[in-house]
Amino acid sequence: MAEQLILLTVGLPWLGALLCWAAGDRHPRLQHTLAVSFSVAAGIAALLLIPFGYERPLVTLPIGGAFGDFTFSPDGLGVFLAAVATVIGSLAVIFSVDYMRGEAQLGRYYAFVLFFIGAMVGLVLTTNLLLMFVFWEITALTSYALISFHNDDPKAVAGGIKALIITQFGGLGLLIGALVLFAHTGSYDILAVIANPGLLPSGALAWMAFGCLAAAAAKSAQFPFQTWLPDAMEAPTPISALIHAATMVNAGVYLLARFFPAFEGVPGWREAVMAVGMLSALLAAVMAIVATDLKRVLAYSTVSQLGYMVYAVGAGGVFAAQFHLLSHSVFKALLFLGAGAVIHSVGTRDMRQMGGLGKKMPFVRLVFVIGALALAGLPVLNGFWSKELILEVGLEHGNPLWMLIVMLVVSGLTAFYTFRMVWLVFYGQPRTELHAHDAGLAMKVALAPLALGTLSTWLLAGSFSRLLSESLPAHRIAAFPTGEILREVLTAPVTLIALLVIGLGLAAWWQRDRLTGLSQALASLGKAAANSFGFEAVNRAVVAVTQDSAEKLRSTQTGMLSWNVAYLVAALIVVLAILALGVGLP
Amino acid sequence: MNPNDAFILAVGLPVIASPVIYLIGRIATRKNPKVDLARWLALLTLLADGYFLFIAGMEFIQSRHELLIAIGAISLRLDGIALLLAAVVLALGTLVTLFSGPAVARDNGRETYFALLTAMIGTIIGLGAADDLFNLWVWFEAMALCSYVLVAFYRNEAAALEAGVKYLVQSALGTVLVLLAIGLVFANTGSLDLDEIRLAAQPSGLMLAAGALFIIGFGVKAALVPLHTWLPDAHSQAPSGISAMLSGVVIEAGLVAILRALGALHLVTVSWGALLLGFSAVNMLVGNLMALRQTQVKRLLAYSSLSHMGYILLGVGAGAVMGSEYSAAGGFFHILTHAMMKGLAFLAAGALLYSLHQAVGNHDPLVLDDLNGASRKYPLAAFAFSVAVLGLGGLPPLAGFMSKWQIFVGGFQTGNAWIMALVVFAALNSVLSLGYYAPLVNRLYRRQPAGIVEQGRPIPVLMSVPMVVLSLGVVVLGVWPSLADWLTGPAAQSLLMLFGG
Amino acid sequence: MTISIPTTVIIMVLGLIGIGIYALLTTRHLIKVIVALQLLVKGAMLALVLAGRLTGQEELGQSLAITVIIADTIVAVIGMALAVQVRRVIGTLDLRSLTSLRR
């Protein structure tokens, strides 16, 4: 039964992708129907798979040799993320029925969305590190293809290629990790190294640990690779919600959480993970404060919230990280789809042109505000509970206090930019004449469950902790009933401090006119933030140097025969010299 | 049928059939210019040849005994490397023959084209199986002669002639160096037989010089940087089917010649493998950087062949130095997947070149701007092209990812820090290569087609069939890489025997 | 002072190869390039014959040389045919006008 469900959760979306593509762009209704039915079916299969997370059945496709056997084994972490990918995936597909209506090349759109969903499921269910890398790369490929879905727009093309190249560059870390694992154990079995990290010599384990950190940082748009995510916002908005907020970017956090028991003993690894998370959370929050593009604000906030999760893993709170991942997937998908409804309706992403839209789009305002409150971390929404759990972990295990203080400050910044965003879009006076209309039926069908989820997923805390605790013995996660977790959060002093800071952030937005002196003092910081603190400049410099040296190298192809012969003679002399010196590999 | 006889036929049939194809094709065309008998004869020959190779190859695979054949001065050995090269060249050659009809039909001399293509396939099979140094040279030279004419096939085009001249002069210089090397080895060991040379060759200055001459002489054909300068010209100016053959198998045949010669000299020095690895690094970097800013599609693909030769060298080099079987198998796997992917890329580019330019009677090169929005009108060619270049860029689930992976795994298994660093460098180069492959795909899927696309002619069905076959192959091997193990495994073992067994 | 036959032949081989490569590096005329290739091959051929003599297998050396002559003649024919076409299509045999393919 479990075998069939695994194959269905990966296979159904892929089959759907083929069919959507084969249906042809002349039959858009058929394509919409196919995409919705296959993604929903995959979602159901993934939900049915959840109980098997306790049993951890093993499915093996024998390949062998340098590729290892392709194995899948759903455990708590795997079935949970597969469910997130497929359920939010199907909601994004349903949303797309309205959002993408009338677009050309729908076949390509749906094929890649479904291809992505299947790959994401494979990524979290496989226990073969090579296969994980394969799925990792397929998600990068689909992400690239969907960011630059509008290929006629040079910004979309550039954004897609940037995302592809940066995530691939970071992905080298995972590649090295997989190669090291195979070179030392002769297999790609993830579970073996998690159960017994001593399989690898400590040096090799360190390479693997930091390689995975680099890969995770690139995939989850963490410091110093965060620059691709804002540019990825050229994608159609359901894609931003699905891939760039709720699922693919979680893969990095998943990787770190999955390998935590193996890597926690590597000197400096936990501290590095915490530092990456903290820096990402802080820098992105500051950038979100000054951004004016609605989707970019959400993108920066994604980086920032993923920073919380990465920080939590480093701090030893795998459960807190995964719980926040669940909350964030739901409320950020809600925010993105809500933003998509706004953008679809008014035709711009610039918040400076919006304002007062709430009256025209009451439904969207309602659900967006729910999502925003969760992002800001206000009780009793799901974001509140999970964020407080993370902050609590920051106090444990002898983690540095100053990092926790930074994370507390970030939660204040989060509240500030969230309210700024909601205000600029839905409240105040309209700043330009915009023709707005409320969301369509398919959009509402997608938004409503997400809003309900934002209000309620925290009730799952108890059963979620039991699932992870029982199926991931190496992670040493303690299982508590929901009531106990909630009581613990409510009675923790950190919670009070955090609420105070969040309140401060709120107050700062209401009193923003009084704070002009402060904002002028911070103007240079704002300017630096608007320029992504120089990271964009670094990116541009790397590209420029590469292109420049490529162009210069072209002059060596002179097109003159005598030069070609001269190269040949020179090469002969060099080879003779190397042979005369007897150069060999040490 | 006796497998030895089958193999003699597999080597000899294309070479013997070549003049027949020419004559009959010529007569048929004279009588009725519309009849394209030469192509069908060539196809028939290659299919029959495939049958003979199958019989001989199965015998070798099952018994694991190399087939040794000597007829007069000709001596042949069917080992893993020979079988791999023969299988790749026959498979790709058959598809190219099927593809080539329309693209050369308008020009006079299509019977020359098919006769020489068939002969070239035969000579490459022979080259892979050559068992003595002079045989090796003869097959190599014969292959080169066929390819000179094919590169300059469009003999009224200035660019094609220029490419042909450069190719001929550089190759001819290379073959002279090989002859000198043979002279040195012959004078030192008194033998031309590869096995006898293996036993007799001792470290000495002259033998080192012979090795250097082999590397440079054969290396011209294998497109080692900086001997590669003819390649972007020849590969971009040749008819597209020939470009596919040149990039897909001819440069690899040059590499096999290097391996055979150096294998015989493997006791002379420890530097052979280090040299191969050195060329690997240079080839990857230079190929990618040169491709990055190209505007002509076929020239871009030609430069990317340089970098893929680098990956192959990394595999076989690490196999030769460290005896790593996965490395060697990965290198040969990459020869196979690169032939499929680069063959597919050139055929797809060729199909577009044909429908956008040649079918309307102009000989302009296919430039990147011509690809804009091509998917609207040519969905199959655009899809095939995308599969090919994304596979070349090493993205899963396509074959190129898996063959690169096997090379990398082998490299890390050696445990040698230099080779591991080279693997990381190779992976970095894969990322760099996406910098020119990805924008190419983006162009194909624009909504607004280029003007030239809107006026383009349809792609003939026979051009589409090879594209479908190769696309499927690239995907299937990407999902199920071990399907090629029966071919790459024995080739790897043969290589390890050459360099140490 | 007497110079042995092998030494003489080695000097001739080196001389032919040297002249050939020098010509390839410096000449700007396509026909001269083809002549230079001929010189190079002749040098290599002599080397093969000499190798046969040095190892006491003169017949083998000579048969190699004859095979090379055949192959070499075909190269020369193709080269000349190309040159004729170059003259016809491009209008000159000067290598400096054969530089349209670069970068």
Image (cartoon, grey):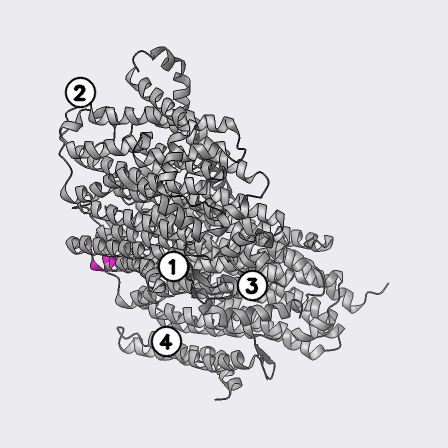
Report x, y in % for residue A408.
42, 26
Subunit bearing disc 2? A
Of the two numbered discs 2 and 4 in the rendering, the one whose residue sits closer to the viewer = 2
- Secondary structure state at the residue bearing disc 3: helix
Report x, y in % for residue A377.
33, 30
User: Label 4 belongs to which residue?
Assistant: B43
Give the amino acid type for the residue marked by disc 3 in the picture.
Tyr
Do circles 2 and 4 both sit on a common chain? Answer: no
Q: Between marks 4 and 1, how big is the CA–CA gap?
A: 20 Å
**Nearest the camera: A35 or B150?**
A35
Q: Mark 4 or mark 1: which comes first in sequence?
A: 4
Do circles 3 and 1 both sit on a common chain? Answer: yes
User: Label 2 belongs to which residue?
Assistant: A429
User: Do tag 2 and tag 3 residues touch (Cβ < 8 Å)?
Assistant: no
Of the two numbered discs 1 and 2 in the rendering, the one whose residue sits closer to the viewer = 2
- The mark found on residue B346 in the picture is 1
Q: Between marks 1 and 2, how big is the CA–CA gap?
A: 59 Å
User: Label 3 belongs to which residue?
Assistant: B326
User: Do tag 3 and tag 4 residues touch (Cβ < 8 Å)?
Assistant: no
Give the magenta range. A20-24
Neighbour tally class for label 2: few under 14, some 14-19, many 20 plus, Cα within 10 Å:
few
Locate residue C88 relative to residue A432 in the image: left or right.
right
Subunit bearing disc 4? B
- Quarter-wise, where is residue B26 in the image? bottom left
Q: Which residue is depicted at the point 30% across and 74% down?
A: B36
- Secondary structure state at the residue bearing disc 2: loop
Give the amino acid type for the residue marked by disc 2 in the picture.
Gln
Neighbour tally class for label 1: few under 14, some 14-19, many 20 plus, Cα within 10 Å:
many
Residue A373 in view (yes/no): yes
Residue A23 lies within the magenta run? yes
Q: Which residue is depicted at the point 35% across and 60% down?
A: A6
User: Do tag 2 and tag 4 residues touch (Cβ < 8 Å)?
Assistant: no
